[in-house]
Image (tube, rainbow, N blue to C red):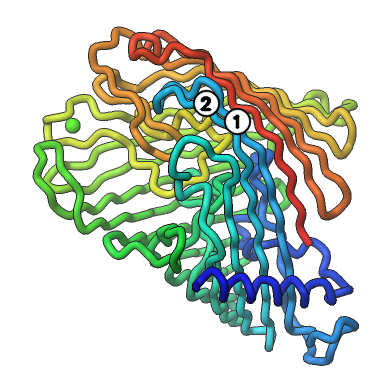
């Protein structure tokens, strides 16, 4: 029933859309960027579109050429992806190929310069998924992905308040992000307030609950967990540099402690990030996060870091070659029974392509070094080659995948060497609306995985097309 009503609504929106002649250029399916989000310095990757601005600001209420009042904006985004996995031994050696289909329809209402409403419906499906019930990250038929009201006050300190179902994306999305690579992606229910007290300074806070994807029924927020946070960012646009400090908190009603006792949990992540460009084509990004708190009587004590350098060599050369080198690490739990939780909690990240595109490694109990090359053989074609080496932080804890799930645990192993991954990705931009991208990753198991009976080389090719109207 829910599907039929929502589908009818979708069709009506599509019909209205087809009448909408003067398409607003770059109308995305996301939310408008804050200064915080728009500073995605040299870190955008295929499959992680950076939000573009939506229609906003003063609009009169006269009708546009398509018959719709000008304060109504419509948009749509389509994304399809063929994905295959070969040798995915960490979850049982399943080989599969399937097609991920996603349609988003947006309506933006701007009845006055200080008031904006945004509604986004999403239909996410998977075809040909052969290994049992499709995970919630793949399929969720027509549902409300975003629906919020935004009030802006433009005075000496600009204030924006957004209440409702919305995307959240902070800094490099290593802790709070939309996870857009996932077919269903992520949104939150709650409130966010953004204050700009001075030029280049942003204070941004939120209190939300994550939306639980529920195929076949209306998605509702998680009742057993709350997420709070605040970030202060200083952006210097001229040098394209940004420095931020943040505090994110996750409060859970019931978790299980190391001794098996159940109780509530409060995990606090305090961190800082700096990113920017330097002379001679150099750029950098550093993020460090420290975690404290408690979980069912255990003490949380963990930390993680990210360090990246990029070099455009030489500036102005053909194909714009850029070399990157990076290191990432996150603490693990050194003793499963000492009442101290050492495994870093990655919260709600956008992890795809951050620690390899095979998504077999998350920001938990890990160490990584990676080098990459970025090229533009032609202007509309971007090519990326990345090589990663992964190790565990401690053998006492296991391997966690991009979703944060522990997939391998082998305390008897004598090596922390998880493996090496080679990623090749290409993105072709076709006009303003279409993007075509393809990639393949190859994960070669290291000694740790071999000793854990995960000896197959894993291949994950994909082909993806995206259209935005
Ligand atoms: Ca422990």
Task: Please name the residue shown 38% across and 54% down the image.
Answer: 247
Q: Quadrant of residue 83?
A: top right
Mark sitting earlier along the chain (1/2): 1
Q: Secondary structure at mark 1?
A: strand
Q: Quadrant of residue 121?
A: bottom right
Q: x, y percentage for residue 307?
A: 52, 31
Q: Residues within 10 Å of mark 2 (few under 14, many from 20)?
A: some
- Give the residue number, with chain letter if any, for mark 2: 95
Q: x, y percentage for residue 383?
A: 76, 29
| Residue closer to the observer: 4 or 194 | 4
Q: Secondary structure at mark 2?
A: strand
Task: Please name the residue shown 59% across and 19% down the image.
Answer: 442
What is the spatial separation of the Cα atoms under label 1 and label 2, in whole angstroms? 8 Å
Q: x, y percentage for residue 21?
A: 88, 74
| Residue closer to the observer: 389 or 14 | 14
| Whether residue 288 can be seen here | yes
Q: Which circle marks residue 361 in the picture? A: none
Direction from residue 156 to residue 94 in the image, left or right = left
Task: Please name the residue shown 87% across and 31% down the image.
Answer: 316
| Whether residue 388 can be seen here | no
Direction from residue 461 to residue 448 in the image, left or right = left
- Give the residue number, with chain letter if any, for mark 1: 84
Q: How many marks?
A: 2
Task: Please name the residue shown 63% across and 84% down the image.
Answer: 114
| Residue closer to the observer: 310 or 297 | 297
Direction from residue 445 to residue 84 in the image, left or right = right
Q: In the picture shown, does residue 136 fall above or below 416?
A: below
Direction from residue 411 to residue 380 in the image, left or right = right
Position of the C terminus, as image quadrant, is: bottom right
Tell me, yes or no, whether the two marked residues, 1 and 2, touch with CB atoms within 8 Å.
yes
Ligand 1 - quadrant of the structure image = top left
């Amino acid at each position: 029933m829910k599907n039929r009503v929502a589908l009818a609504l979708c069709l009506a929106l599509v019909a209205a859309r087809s009448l909408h002649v003067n398409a607003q250029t770059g109308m995305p399916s996301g939310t408008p960027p804050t200064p915080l989000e728009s500073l995605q310095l040299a870190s955008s990757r295929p499959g992680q579109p950076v939000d573009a601005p939506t229609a906003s600001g003063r609009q009169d209420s006269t009708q546009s050429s398509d018959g719709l009042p000008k304060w109504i904006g419509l948009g749509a985004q389509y994304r399809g992806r063929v994905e295959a996995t070969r040798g995915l031994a960490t979850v049982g050696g399943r080989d599969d190929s399937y097609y991920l289909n996603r349609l988003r329809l947006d309506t933006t209402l701007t009845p006055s310069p200080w008031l904006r409403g945004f509604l986004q419906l999403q239909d996410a499906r998977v075809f040909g998924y052969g290994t049992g019930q499709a995970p919630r990250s793949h399929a969720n038929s027509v549902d409300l992905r975003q629906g919020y009201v935004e009030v802006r006050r433009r005075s000496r300190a600009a204030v924006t308040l957004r209440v409702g179902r919305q995307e959240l994306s902070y800094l490099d999305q290593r802790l709070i992000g939309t996870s857009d690579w996932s077919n269903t992606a992520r949104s939150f229910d709650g409130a966010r307030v953004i204050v700009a007290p001075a030029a280049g300074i942003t204070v941004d806070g939120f209190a939300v609950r994550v939306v639980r994807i529920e195929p076949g029924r209306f998605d509702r927020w998680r009742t057993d967990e709350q997420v709070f946070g605040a970030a202060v960012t200083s952006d210097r646009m001229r040098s394209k540099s940004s420095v931020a400090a943040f505090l994110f908190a996750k409060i859970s009603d019931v978790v299980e402690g190391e001794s098996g006792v159940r109780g509530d949990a409060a995990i606090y992540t305090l961190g800082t990030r700096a990113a920017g460009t330097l002379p001679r084509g150099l750029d950098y990004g550093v993020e460090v996060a420290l975690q404290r708190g408690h979980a069912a009587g255990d003490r949380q004590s963990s930390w993680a870091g990210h360090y990246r350098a990029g070099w455009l060599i030489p500036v102005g050369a053909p194909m714009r070659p850029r070399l990157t080198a990076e290191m990432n690490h996150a603490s693990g739990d050194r003793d499963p029974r000492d009442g101290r939780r050492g495994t870093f909690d990655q919260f709600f990240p956008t992890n795809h392509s951050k620690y390899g595109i095979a998504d077999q490694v998350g920001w938990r109990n890990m160490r990584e070094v990676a080098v990459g090359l970025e090229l533009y053989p032609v202007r509309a074609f971007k090519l990326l080659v990345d090589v990663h080496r992964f190790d565990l932080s401690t053998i006492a804890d296991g391997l966690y995948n991009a979703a944060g799930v522990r997939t391998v645990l082998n305390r008897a192993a004598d090596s922390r060497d998880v493996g090496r991954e080679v990623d090749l990705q290409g993105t072709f931009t076709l006009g303003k609306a279409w993007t075509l991208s393809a990639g393949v990753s190859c994960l070669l198991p290291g000694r740790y995985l071999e000793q854990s009976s995960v000896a197959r080389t894993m291949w994950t090719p994909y082909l993806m097309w995206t259209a935005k109207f």
